[in-house]
Image (cartoon, rainbow, N blue to C red):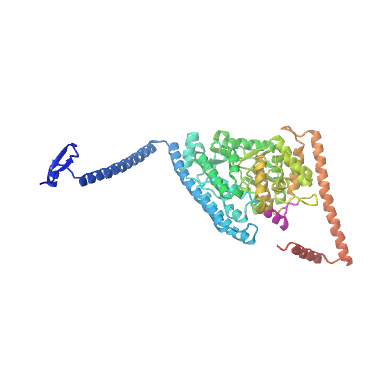
Amino acid sequence: MEKLVLRSCIKCQSLRFFSSPTQLSTHGIHTTASLRQKAGGGKVGGWRRIRRGLLYGIGGATASSGILYAIADEPQRRKVRVLLGGIKRFFRSLKIGTLISLDYKYNLWGIAEDSEEYNELIKPCHKRAAERLLEGCLANGGLYVKLGQGLVSMNHILPREYLETLVVLQDRALPKKPHDIEQLFQEDFGKQPQEFFKKFEEEPIAAASLAQVHRAETHDGQQVAVKVQYIDLQDRFAGDVWTCEQLLKLIGWMHPKFAFAWVLQDLKDTLVQELDFVNEGKNSERCQSDLSHLKYVYVPKVHWDKTSTRVLTAEFIDGCKISNKDAIKKMGLSLYDVDQKLCRAFADQIFLSGFVHADPHPGNVFIRKDVKGQAQLVLLDHGLYDKLTQDDRQSLCSLYKAIVLNKEDNMQKFSKALGVDDHDVFCEILVQRPVSRSSTYLPSHMTKEDLKHMQYMAQKHFDKIMQVLKDMPRPIILIIRNMNTIRAICQEHGNLIDRYGIMAKSAIRGARKFGVQDISWTGRIKAWLEMMNYDFRIKAENFKIWIGIVYLRILVWLGRVPSLEEIRSVIEKEQKRLNPV
């Protein structure tokens, strides 16, 4: 008897009895196996349809994006390019930050920080980290180069390997294509630069992290310098700042002693101001006004009818960088005189007005002869400024005066007035040298022992330094940068002047200035008496030293004491015995 099979049709779902597989296939009825095969094929077909839909969706979105990009105007296209470039810069920066952190962690794992082995192993780590940072700054450009330059100015904190590697950023930038400049002029003025000026040199004469400078001639024959901001900088600023913040937070999480994210957070507003060239022009006019009592300071005049937020046109100045010692000497000018004027100008900015140029590096200070043949300072690039409140300015004046006059009670008092409890560290950060001494005179040149002390503080008490930087008023961070830059210039010239004495006299005058008004006559007299007292104390100390040397020479001549060379040799041996390191 034949076995009957009950099956349903896939299409009509009706039930039927069949006696053989042949009848099943011929009547369109499927067995259980064939049903499973059909169901499996349905699943495969479903995934294929999903993949096909995704591909069509991606393709459609890509095509639509391409069409929208093609019909968009240039500013909109630039924002798209900035977005894509920002993603690339983020991952590049993340990679560099991660590699640097892992390098330190891996190579210094389990090694005591106060050991000789640690000090030796950390140097190559510093070198590799600095090289990676340099590579990242140059690849990313813009704000990253600016931050790298800021790191170089922190030469009192950063290890030597960082300074030697990153110093090239001071003169490095990424010149843009002529098309970018033409597009920017078209957007800001509705004209090409060749129309806007009688002559316009496409090749920049200088390039910095945020802009490049071109020489031009106006239609009325005036020679001008045209500072043109990189066209995509404002578009990419917010994204780059966010990226840097996240990386600094990551570094602070992995290395708590190096938590610098708060610095960038506080400097954001200042950096935004630096991108506004109209604001820079106003800063330059304020600078000229504040220093009008110094006839040897000159600030180029702004051509406001040829200036926008991204283009600054000012008179062209022919001179040499203050770092070019040979060129200064060829002009017949004295480095001593130049340094005196440099230090006085910026000391008056800090202590008398509180409106301070925060980036006076050698490229921003030119030297030329005035009409009398004397050295004249030309101050350029007024984008980065910060302003002290009147109370903070007076407290800073009194603190600096206390440091130079070696009055520790006042150091403590006015440090607290500025919000800082650790006055010892604060004062050393401010003057960039040890402040504890037995005499009034504070020498500009540091001894080997002084350098060792500062390096020891930077390595072993970095947490204290960071706390002081957090506690102090934010504008003082940029003022310290100003002081560091001036100190480096004077050091490069050979420490020819008494820098602390010059600044102390400005601080003495500033402490007598109340509010925004000029110093009163009584204040001038009191300030003059204090300066006379300071000069007298310094000269009295120098006279005592001179008397001591003369007396010693007489004793040597009489044969009562060994020669000066023998005394010096004994002192050096004792120092080595007491300080074998």
- The residue positioned farthest toward the left in the image shown: 1
Question: Residue 75, relative to residue 500: is it above or below?
Answer: above
In front of the other: 522 or 493: 522
Whether the magenta-drawn stretch holds residue 435 is answered as no
Q: Residue at x 62, y 54 (%)?
A: 159
Specify whether 297 is left or right of 23.
right
Q: Is residue 361 left or right of residue 211?
A: right
Residue 185 locus on image (x, y percent): 49, 37
What secondary structure characterizes most of the magenta part?
helix
Q: Magenta segment: does it hold 445?
A: yes
* Quarter the C terminus occupies: bottom right
Q: Is residue 412 above or below residue 326?
A: above
Report the front residue among 484 and 374.
Answer: 484
In which image quadrant can residue 411 be found?
Answer: top right
**Residue 502 picture location, percent across and down:** 75, 46
Nearest the camera: 26 or 434? 26
In-front residue for pair 369/289: 289
- Identify the residue at image location x=56%, y=45%: 249
Residue drawn at x 54%, y 57% as measured from the top left: 106
Q: Which residues are magenta?
A: 443-456
Q: Position of residue 363 (x, y in %)?
A: 61, 47
Query: Is residue 352 in view from this perspective?
Result: no
The mark total stands at: 0
Name which quarter of the figure residue 346 lies in: top right
On the question of residue 279 being in view, the answer is yes
Give the left or right position of residue 250, taking residue 8 as reference.
right
Q: Position of residue 362 (x, y in %)?
A: 63, 48
Q: Residue furthest front?
A: 1
